[in-house]
């Protein structure tokens, strides 16, 4: 810790990168499950599925124990197999690529759009021209931005996939409840997979959801979700007659969502839009307060703020500039502010780099983003004083880097700095 950070240590706040809000009816619903005596997949999971499908407007919603499980089930339902090629962005979490390897298939990585961090119909069309043997596209709605699926020109992502006859699976771990033009992410494409991990807009602790409008895909996903058994335990229990009888029609997995988790999810679901709106308010604050810092770049969006899920708020520090992304992360940590990096790209992970002989030069936009990326705290429990402290700390970092020590004077931002009682470090 440098001297100026030490002088501020008594004023440091504690702002974690993420914090779960369980201030709704979580305890009430969990209590109902405990009192029922049936803790695994049952009525609460089914209720969450029904409400989720109603929100998205799709025919089927299938609750699972993680978004990774949903992605695995999705590729299985699309008959992805050994030697098949699946197109996906390198700027994503490892789960997006690893499920491809689960199937014995090979991930084909592509670069992303600089303004959004996402793939697009145009980029995918170019990639499909280069790789004519692609069987499926895994689209990551990075940060909660809803990728355009369809448009009148036929250049949306779903349009392009349909035109080329490839499956479209949406990795929407970040994108609940994102929508575009009134259509929720999760309605278009073959399958969409959501995450209910602890730092998402709504959580079940661990969990996820698969949505589809295909009866055949839904039937396959439900079968494979629980060992390939043709009747789930809750169904056998409630039907009573011949309750023990079941058969295994495929070698499935153990991916069901227990009712204890679904109970938390139901309580979270009731406040989903309110929690999303508060994230939007955080994003608006950052956009207003950080726009004047020339050394960082903010992502852009062509949708209305209320259509964005705002799961992440990443900033990109100029990797060619004077200031290091890691130095900013360390500075913020010294001042009690948690951050993260989304993500170390797939092409830089040892397994994929070595197996597929990947070269960072082939993904210049992804490289620029990851080399400078810092994800700031964004969640509904943040108050304006927290957001102002974060933005002021970022401004202070760049002041300390830019100015000779004798010229330091944080009174250039008197209102916000005084609001946090951060002293003038030259006094």
Image: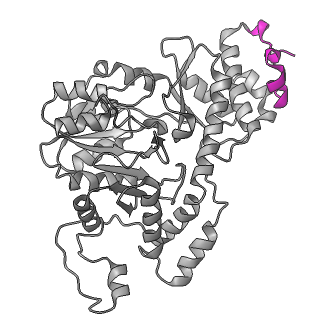
Name the foreground residue: 286 vs 65. 286
- Residue 297: quarter of image: top right
Q: Residue furthest bottom?
A: 241
Determine whether 142 is above or below 417 in the image: below
The image shows residue 23 at horizontal and vertical percentages of 67, 60
Can residue 99 be spotted in the picture? yes
Q: Residue at x 64, y 33 (%)?
A: 333
The image shows residue 205 at horizontal and vertical percentages of 51, 59
In the picture provided, is 407 more to the left or to the right than 317? right
The image shows residue 45 at horizontal and vertical percentages of 44, 69
- Residue 136: quarter of image: top left
Q: Is residue 203 magenta?
A: no
Determine whether 252 is above or below 313 in the image: below
Q: Residue at x 53, y 37 (%)?
A: 312
Q: Residue at x 71, y 20 (%)?
A: 396
Q: Residue at x 68, y 47 (%)?
A: 381
In the picture provided, is 138 more to the left or to the right than 250? right
In the rendered image, the quadrant that contains the C terminus is: top right
Total label count?
0
In the rendered image, the quadrant that contains the N terminus is: top right
Name the foreground residue: 1 vs 236. 236
- Which coloring applies here? one colour
In the picture provided, is 409 more to the left or to the right than 178? right
Which range of residues does the magenta coloring cover? 405-427
């Amino acid at each position: 810790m440098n001297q100026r950070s030490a002088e501020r240590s008594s004023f440091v706040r504690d702002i974690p990168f993420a914090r779960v809000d369980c201030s709704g009816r979580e305890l009430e619903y969990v209590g109902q499950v405990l009192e029922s005596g049936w803790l695994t997949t049952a009525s609460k999971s089914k209720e969450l599925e029904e409400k989720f499908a109603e929100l998205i407007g799709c025919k089927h919603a299938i609750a699972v124990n993680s978004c990774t499980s949903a992605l695995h089930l999705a590729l299985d339902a699309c008959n992805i197999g050994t030697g098949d090629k699946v197109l996906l962005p390198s700027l994503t979490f490892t789960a997006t690529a690893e499920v491809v390897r689960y199937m014995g298939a090979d991930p084909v990585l592509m670069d992303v759009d600089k303004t959004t961090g996402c793939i697009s119909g145009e980029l995918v069309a170019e990639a499909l021209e280069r790789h004519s043997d692609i069987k499926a596209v895994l689209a990551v709605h990075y940060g909660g931005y809803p990728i355009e699926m369809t448009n009148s020109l036929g250049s949306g992502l779903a349009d392009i996939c349909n035109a080329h006859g490839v499956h479209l699976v949406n990795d929407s771990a970040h994108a609940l409840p994102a929508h575009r033009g009134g259509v929720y992410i999760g309605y278009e494409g073959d399958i969409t997979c959501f995450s209910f991990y602890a730092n998402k807009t709504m959580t079940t602790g661990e969990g996820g959801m698969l949505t589809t409008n295909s009866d055949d895909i839904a039937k396959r996903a439900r079968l494979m979700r629980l060992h390939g058994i043709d009747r789930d335990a809750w169904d056998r229990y409630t039907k009573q007659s011949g309750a023990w009888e079941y058969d295994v029609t495929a070698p499935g997995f153990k991916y069901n969502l227990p009712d204890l988790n679904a109970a938390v999810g139901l309580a979270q679901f009731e406040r989903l839009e309110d929690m999303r709106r508060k994230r939007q308010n955080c994003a608006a604050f950052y956009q207003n307060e950080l726009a004047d810092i020339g050394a960082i770049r903010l992502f852009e969006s062509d949708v209305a703020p209320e259509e964005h899920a705002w799961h992440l708020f990443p900033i990109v520090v100029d990797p060619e500039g004077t200031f290091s992304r890691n130095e900013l992360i360390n500075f913020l940590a010294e001042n009690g502010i948690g951050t993260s990096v989304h993500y170390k790209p797939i092409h830089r992970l040892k397994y994929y780099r070595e197996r597929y002989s990947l070269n960072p030069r082939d993904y210049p936009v992804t490289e620029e983003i990851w080399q400078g990326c810092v994800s700031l705290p964004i969640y509904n429990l943040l108050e304006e004083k927290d957001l102002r402290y974060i933005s002021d700390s970022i401004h202070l970092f760049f002041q300390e880097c830019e100015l000779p020590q004798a010229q330091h004077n944080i009174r250039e931002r008197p209102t916000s700095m005084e609001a946090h009682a951060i002293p003038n470090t030259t006094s």
